[in-house]
Image (spheres, coloured by chain):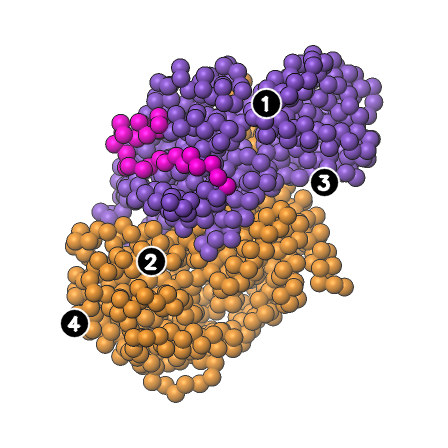
Chain colours: A purple, B orange
Amino acid sequence: MSVAGEIDQVMQKAQVAFLAYKKCSLEERANFMREIGEELANIRADVVPLSMEEAHLSNDRMDGELNRTIYQLNNYAKNAAEGSWLDVRINKGVPNEDTDIRKMMVPLGPVVVFGASNFPFAYSTAGGDTACAFAAGCPVVVKGHPAHIRTSEMVGNAIQKAAQKCDMPEHIFQHVSNDSFDAGQELVKHSLTKAVGFTGSLGGGRALFDLANQRENPIPVFSEMGSVNPVFLMPDKLQESTEDIALMYADSITQSVGQFCTNPGLIFGIEGSDLEEFISTLSEKIKRKLPESMLHDGIAKAFLEKKKKALAQQGVEIEAVAEEKEVSGKGMPTIASTTGELFLKNKTLHQEVFGPYSLVIKCKDLEQMQEIIAQLEGQLTSTLMATEKDVADCPEILERVQEICGRLIMNGVPTGVTVCTAMHHGGPYPATTDSRFTSVGADGIRRFARPLCYQNFSNLLLPDELKNENPLGIWRKVNDVMTKDVITS
Amino acid sequence: MSVAGEIDQVMQKAQVAFLAYKKCSLEERANFMREIGEELANIRADVVPLSMEEAHLSNDRMDGELNRTIYQLNNYAKNAAEGSWLDVRINKGVPNEDTDIRKMMVPLGPVVVFGASNFPFAYSTAGGDTACAFAAGCPVVVKGHPAHIRTSEMVGNAIQKAAQKCDMPEHIFQHVSNDSFDAGQELVKHSLTKAVGFTGSLGGGRALFDLANQRENPIPVFSEMGSVNPVFLMPDKLQESTEDIALMYADSITQSVGQFCTNPGLIFGIEGSDLEEFISTLSEKIKRKLPESMLHDGIAKAFLEKKKKALAQQGVEIEAVAEEKEVSGKGMPTIASTTGELFLKNKTLHQEVFGPYSLVIKCKDLEQMQEIIAQLEGQLTSTLMATEKDVADCPEILERVQEICGRLIMNGVPTGVTVCTAMHHGGPYPATTDSRFTSVGADGIRRFARPLCYQNFSNLLLPDELKNENPLGIWRKVNDVMTKDVITS
């Protein structure tokens, strides 16, 4: 069968599953998600070693990531059932006597998920996008990542098992193992595909976005494509905590071989002795970091090439390289530096080098730092290392940095994305393809739902979420007031 | 100066205004919006006659539309100040002890608005898109519609006056009177433009959407592009109220010369004597309707051409045409009919004929009606004329019709879009370019805002919306619970 024919069968099945799954209650969806979590816990002893083998990550990392994945499923299940994401609005008798208009979120339809190479569990087969789609009421088709396809299949089987246990519609979840470029294209182009979630490179994420927008009927694509996550060392804070900051960042830069989309790739400070001391302490630590295996050969090769290109730019100095002997496939932690002036002139230095590499930029003064912020691209995160005095002395930095990112960290590191409802993992392009949505936290459900409005319906025919008696006990906005009350009139 | 140079100046000024306006409080934004409403009321005696002259619409219609526009500004202002649209989420001490993560919606940046030809007030210069953008904290650049450019300029001056009275940043609102295609293109392509609102044709809306997605940094475009708003006459209801339904629809089809994006363009029934009686009563009413001037010559010409094309399709019968003599520029109310079988085979019949025209489709049975629903494009609205017995006899119709529209009306007409929070004016493509958003109701504000997350900030440095003491008294989700409480720990 042709690839197009194969994908058509998959999507036809997904559509049948959709028409059944959308009728399941919020509680049924939540139970299914919790059951997936239990099935993942059941296969821990097999799937953790397999993921370690495929993705070259440590036992601790993969065990922790599995926990995170299970936590996500449970947290999004709880938030899905709580129902406030449905944005129920009811206008009855207002603004006019005969007004009876009610709306709520309904699922978009079948969602296609492209998993990340760097998170075999948490942003892959049973990861955040899949959890959000299930919560919204959408069936999921996952295109397994070729770098950990066996892990993906094993996780997929756990989802299938949970679906059977919970009596979910057949084909609510499908795993496409065909790793051809064509298969991905056909999935995005198929008329029954209603949304896409992607985590990966700018090139890949943009290609899917373009493909989806060129369809006769365009569909939303949420691509999370990473960023360089600039860090701004403000003078008072740097003077106060030079060593602490250097130690904190040596760890952040090299955590999981720098293979996080929140890895701090650019560190800005004001030239002078404090910054030199920071660089020197950071360098000492980086030299002693051990190079570790990267996720796969393609990523290791890309790291080498991009780093080489960055280091070859005029005025870029190598500050530190891990002292261990270089071994093919392992990422050598590296720190380089340049000046604010050269950084402003050279857009190559603004680009992500995915891996354990950071560039320290010595700015002439705070004014130049502001000028640089105005020229940076959209970012998932930005970080300010600052005392209250720093902010009072130059409020413009805090002001401007908010324009370029989705999450702003004060006196911390950008790595480590806590799973919670207040988290925002998104940001202006090219961090993502739509800054209005997140891929971490229960608000990610919104990517896969749309409002549907019911006008002049009898109470009997309304969905439970909209009925007068509020049988689900959810928060609703009735005549512009948030309430859980029943509607009596 | 070149068009590109002219637009660059406009957008640079809009960006300066943005950096100032985003600091204004919710209450300051709301006051500004209310003041615009007052200024519009002040120019009523001048602007209503001017709009009547430019758009060929009646005094009652334009006076009512001005009221609607003022109501919109006030209602969105109230909802903006109420603050629940900010989607404040706070996680403190949960899930981990050291968690302090808070997020809220912030404005995207300068918004470009392309007004509608058919609503010189309510969807134009000071219309819904502009009101939503101001509420979100975004400055607005309006490209005035050439069909009512003088009305647009007069309304623009009223906005300027309100801005001055409220001490708003200069250039918070700018009016571009250059009606060239180039000017529109440059506005959408400019790097400082952060979102676009459009109301109009499929061709125009899609062109702007494509242009925005082809940018180096794509931006969201919400194009509302109309639809054919199918109406389904279920057998029991039709038998019960044949005449009432016919009279109701004769008015709906011809209201404002059929120039509403919610005009009922397709009416489906089951072949037989009840449907014949409905057609006959509808036809009698339509014949006696007076043809009225259309908005402008371009629309009148398009109506003639599209109607001619539709009527020329095989198996399409003219049922009724207004009996008054045809006059150039006036829209002749027209009803035609065809069979379900021919409708299924001919996609030309699915297309919108913008003006006072509807096609009645005689379906063989309810099964054929379902088959047709599955093939219809995305719609702003669908309407079911049905008794509870009708729904019980064939629940699949109610089920399926929800998949294709943004608003579902029971036993009413789709024309008349009530301004209220529960309203949804949107729908699957090609009704709009993104089914997840609305252009009517305060939730339309969301189109122009994105989440921004603050991690580990001291209470002092947080925006008021996120401070422990909740100084604005707004609804917030704290550790996954909706509350207005202060945070004490």
Circle 2 packing at 10 Å, graded few (<14), some (14-19), many (20+), is few
Q: CA distance from mark 4 to mark 2?
A: 26 Å
Q: Which mark is residue B375?
A: 2
| Residue A175 in sight in this render | yes
Say above or below: A367 vs B194: above
Label 2 close to label 1 by CB (< 8 Å) = no
Q: Where does the image place residue B133, in percent across and percent down from the top left?
A: 56, 50
Circle 4 packing at 10 Å, graded few (<14), some (14-19), many (20+), is few
Mark 4 or 2, nearer chain start:
4
Say above or below: B35 vs A225: below
Q: Which mark is residue A375?
A: 3
Magenta part of the protein: which range?
A157-181
Left or right: A331 in relation to B274: right
Q: CA distance from mark 3 to mark 2?
A: 48 Å
Say above or below: A57 vs B392: above
SS label for mark 2 = helix
**Residue B106 picture quarter:** top right
Q: Chain of mark 2?
A: B
Q: Where does the image place residue A376, in percent across and percent down from the top left?
A: 69, 38
Mark 2 or 1, closer to the camera: 1
Residue type at mark 1: give it. Answer: Met
Residue type at mark 4: give it. Answer: Ser
SS label for mark 4 = helix
Q: Residue at x 46, y 25 (%)?
A: A121
Q: Nearer the viewer, residue B154 or A386?
A: A386
Label 3 close to label 2 by CB (< 8 Å) = no
Name the residue that disc number 1 marks: A294
Q: Which mark is residue B273?
A: 4
Left or right: A332 in relation to B210: right
Left or right: B369 in relation to A65: left
